[in-house]
Image (spheres, rainbow, N blue to C red):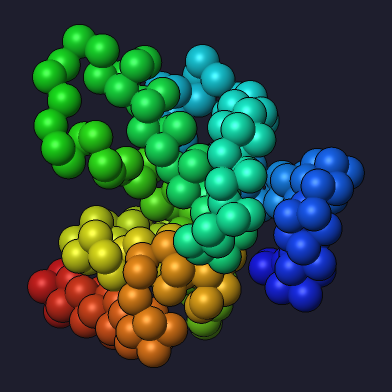
Amino acid sequence: MAIQDSETEELIERAGHGDRLARQELLMRHQARLRQMIAVRMDSRLGARLDPSDVVQEVFADACQKLSDYLQKRPLPFYPWLRQLAWERLVKLHQRHIQAQRRSTSREQHDLALPDESAMALANRLLASGSSPSRQAMREELRRRVQTALGQLAQRDREVLVMRYLEQLSTREIAAVLEITEGAVKTRHLRALERLRKLLSDDSADG
């Protein structure tokens, strides 16, 4: 859940005036959300080597170095800015530990594939938000179909669902991350759900 903007704004104001405790609190109050984001995005092969909490500490180190510049320019709301640092850190870690033996491409440098565990978690969240089959076997089958359908969505639509249901970003935060309007976020969200329903319907018809 998004932390109240007024509380964050107050800390930013104090931090901008040199309050060191405010700077520390500004980071620490977002620690749980940042850890969740990293856990959602971290490749299982990377997770076998690093704990999300370790990555959070690396992100905080980056943030401490760049915080003064952020406080002057305020290019993004605070959490989307912090999340961007985490994304960049994860990409670097993925390249170092997973892609070390492969030639990286432009896509590999800027994108992170959604881990299977996170795709399953998203399928579970989407199933939990609606009616669910009473029998376990039916629910397992439906979860498999949802996970498969998620893989067929356009990346930009799937990202909205991931940020909304797994990272629990607000519409405003998603808009800041994707650099689009809040209205566009809502449109993409509805479009993704409709596309998902259609894929499931088509899959059921084919079956």
Q: Nearer the viewer, residue 112 or 140?
A: 112
- Residue 118 percent location from the top left of the image: 45, 48
As rendered, which of 195 and 188 lies closer to the eye?
Answer: 188
Q: How many numbered discs? A: 0
Residue 145 seen in render: no
Quadrant location of the C terminus?
bottom left
Residue 2 at x, y percent in the picture: 67, 68
> Which residue occupies 52% across, 69% down?
173
- In the rendered image, residue 144, in percent from the top left (x then y), is placed at 34, 56
On screen, residue 179 versus residue 12, left or right, reads left
The quarter of the displayed image where residue 87 is located: top left
In the image, 96 versus 204, the foreground residue is: 96
Identify which residue, 21 or 94, lies in the foreground. 21
Residue 180 drawn above or below residue 33: below
Tell me the quarter of the picture where residue 152 sits: bottom left
Residue 97 locus on image (x, y percent): 36, 15
